[in-house]
Amino acid sequence: MEIKLTRRKFLLTAGTIAVANLLPPPVDSEAMVSSNSFATLIDLTKCDGCKNYSVPLCVSACKEANRDKFPEPDRKMLKPYWPQKFFDDWSSKRDVIDRLTPYNWIFVQRIKINKEGKEEEIFVPRRCMHCDNPPCAKLCPFGVNKKHPEGPVTIDCKLCFGGAKCKDVCPWGVPQRQAGVGVYTYLDPLPVGGGVMYKCDLCFDRVKKGQNPVCVNKCPKNAISFGRREEIFAKADLLAREKKLYIYGKEENGGTSTLYLSPVTFEELDKAVLQENKEKKQVMRFHKPKNMLDKYKNLAKLILLSPFVAIISAFISAKKVNRED
Amino acid sequence: MKGNNNKVYRHTKLEIAIHWLTAVSGIALIISGLGEMPMYKRYNITKLPFLSFLGSYEINLVIHYLFASLFIFAVFFHIVYHLRRKELSLLPKKGDLKESYLVLKAIIKGEKEPPHEKFLAEQRLAYVAIGSVSLVLIITGLIKTYKNIGPVVLNPDFLMIVTLVHTVFTMFFIILFVLHIGAFIVKDNRELLKSMFTGYVKYEYAKRRHPKWIEQIEKTSK
């Protein structure tokens, strides 16, 4: 049988092949992130919040290791973000350890739960989840919030404007802003920017050298494991199966590289967190956020398709008009 | 010569449709693109009536995605269609810079402009400027969109450059857009605006301002 290849057929076929090659297949997030990247497993059955220490050791180790990265604001720049009446300044509250701040990139959440009539406490080290498809990094208007192939999500403090969009789009509100530092200070008195955003960078400098993040090494209970993603995920699955534990972080926000193992469900933990922090404006929850970018990925694909559709339509239209002429 | 009632046919319906598709989607992209910068809340724009939605990054993202697909469609359609039709009169010609200067001088001093072709020399230059900026925005925008499809991890430094270029060229796009609108301050240019709705310009206007174009039409219709 003879197949007649017209120009229109050729263009349609070529366009379809090009689009099919351009778009990645619809796979789940786990498969798209390199198994060779790094992940963390935090076992809540082991963490006791360092009861015998004044400051949990993961927290003190993080503060010590990142001391040089903490902001030293220009006092003159500590003024409201015009026309707003507020500004974010944590420089006089550097000792705060019960939440994330620009000077505290990990904290231990203490959650009281009721288990079979008995009140129990669960201790949860909380910091950036280092998401697989992080809206904070992918929607940063300056591209200074970066997702690295190794897994960590980092912020380039030298170029950050401190607009705090990353904090708004993070389901856990992780990045924290300090005024009086960063590039926006050079633009004063122009009312733009607000400082620099700070958060856990998973000790990326250490990870690149083959070392563990400091919080992992300092944990006296070995509650935090760090390693290749494939191994960490396999370990989490095995422990969850064997000890009947619950996993958090695998699906949330489209997948993350931080997994939690808990003896109680995360719905229960989330409920308890909300109950205990009713008055607080911002609470780090254990909810099940959907990834904003995943939600609209079909619209994104439409954009990638539009040049091909346009080229084919233009060819056909021009040919028709040329013929009429 | 096409047209009637002393009118000259300047734009086809398809050209008009593509022009307005580009314009409307371009405006929507500017608004939603600025909304992806943390500024509407900061400057209290969201407190204005009916504009609270601009404070949502998610809504701005959806608007940006929808209109980006229309904008890209319009730009690619325009390029390919006119290349296929060999309609290249909007591309700059030798001497356009000098002619633009003379036209501007004539407009400012109220003197007689040099005779124009279908398009003014500065229109041809502005076309290339806005076209090049649009293409840079489209290319960087496509890369930015690709990485949003899923957990796609591109080189973060490359992405930073792409993102910065997209943001900076957005500013250029806004400037060129304002200049484009500003061109209608010149009374004579408003006839051209009308033609972007009707497709026609008055014969007297065309004969007076675009004699080279009319000459060409008359020559080909003989």
Image (cartoon, coloured by chain):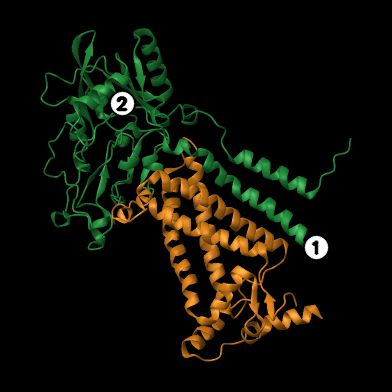
For the residue labelled by badge 2, is the local secondary structure a helix, a strand or a loop?
loop
Quadrant where the C terminus of chain B sits is bottom right
Residue found at x 14% / y 35%:
A96
Q: CA distance from mark 2 to mark 1?
A: 64 Å
For residue B11, above or below residue A74: below
Disc 1 marks which residue? A324
Looking at the colours in the rendered structure, which chain would you say is drawn in green? A
Image quarter of residue A223: top left
The amino acid type of the residue labelled 1 equals Glu
Asked if residue A139 shows in the view, the reply is no
Indicate which disc, 2 or 1, sits on the residue closer to the N terminus: 2
A38 with respect to A118 (left or right):
right
Q: Is residue B212 above or below residue A63?
A: below
Q: Position of residue A303 (x, y in %)?
A: 55, 47
Task: Tell me, yes or no, if residue A320 can be seen here.
Answer: yes
Of the pair A158 and B83, the residue shown nearer to us = B83
Say which chain is orange: B
Same-chain check, marks 2 and 1: yes
Q: Pick the residue in front: B177 or A213.
A: B177
